[in-house]
Amino acid sequence: MEKKIIKVERGDITNSRADAIVNAANNHLWMGAGVAGAIKRKGGDIIEREAVSKGPIPVGETVATTAGSLPNKYVIHAAAMGQDLVTDELKIAAATKNALMSAEELNLESIDFPALGTGVGGFPVETAAKIMVDAVKDFLAGSKSVQRVGFVLFDDGSFKAFRAELGTERKEI
């Protein structure tokens, strides 16, 4: 059986070459600041228009849209918080799992995540790293199509937290 890969890298998720990237979204799917703003600026307004047309969605759920002018096939919008911009462990875990399930349903091989809930949501990055890495490990054990999951972190603190949680920058499972 082919090994599956989890990677952690420091960088700009809008430069990802994965089949899909995850947008750290609110449940109304408006794309304002942080990761969402970067995706909208680089990929185009079409991504937000398509996302908003599919919302609002329950917190923890996801929707997939085209990726506009980004090099990816899809943007998967993971609602880790509501309009109140507040999140918690359960919301981050559900958003992570549902983004992975969306990638599987779309028959994708690779997906890259930012740290969910740690920007405007203010959630501790070390805790988010544990929740998200655990969710990815659990998911990959039974995944049929998804072979590579990446965490692409914009700042040094987030990169170090995810690398510490994974124990390395690349792990085969």
Image (cartoon, rainbow, N blue to C red):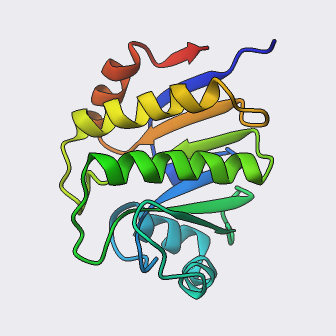
Residue drawn at 59 percent across, 77 percent down: 44
Vertical placement of residue 52 versus 168, above or below: below
Q: Position of residue 156 (x, y in %)?
A: 28, 35
Kindly indicate the quadrant of the structure image that contains residue 47: bottom right
Quarter of the figure that contains the C terminus: top right
Residue drawn at 76 percent across, 38 percent down: 109
Residue 169 seen from this side: yes
| Horizontal relation, residue 9 to residue 80: left or right | right
- As rendered, which of 11 and 35 lies closer to the eye? 35
- As rendered, which of 157 and 74 lies closer to the eye? 74
| Horizontal relation, residue 32 to residue 22: left or right | left
Q: Position of residue 64 (x, y in %)?
A: 65, 66
Q: How many marks?
A: 0
Residue drawn at 53 percent across, 27 percent down: 138
Q: Position of residue 171 (x, y in %)?
A: 54, 15
Residue 116 seen from this side: no
Kindly indicate the quadrant of the structure image that contains residue 117: bottom left
| Horizontal relation, residue 26 to residue 125: left or right | right
Q: Position of residue 122 (x, y in %)?
A: 18, 55
Vertical placement of residue 121 versus 124, above or below: below
Residue drawn at 72 percent across, 15 percent down: 3
Vertical placement of residue 122 versus 55, above or below: above
Quarter of the figure that contains the N terminus: top right
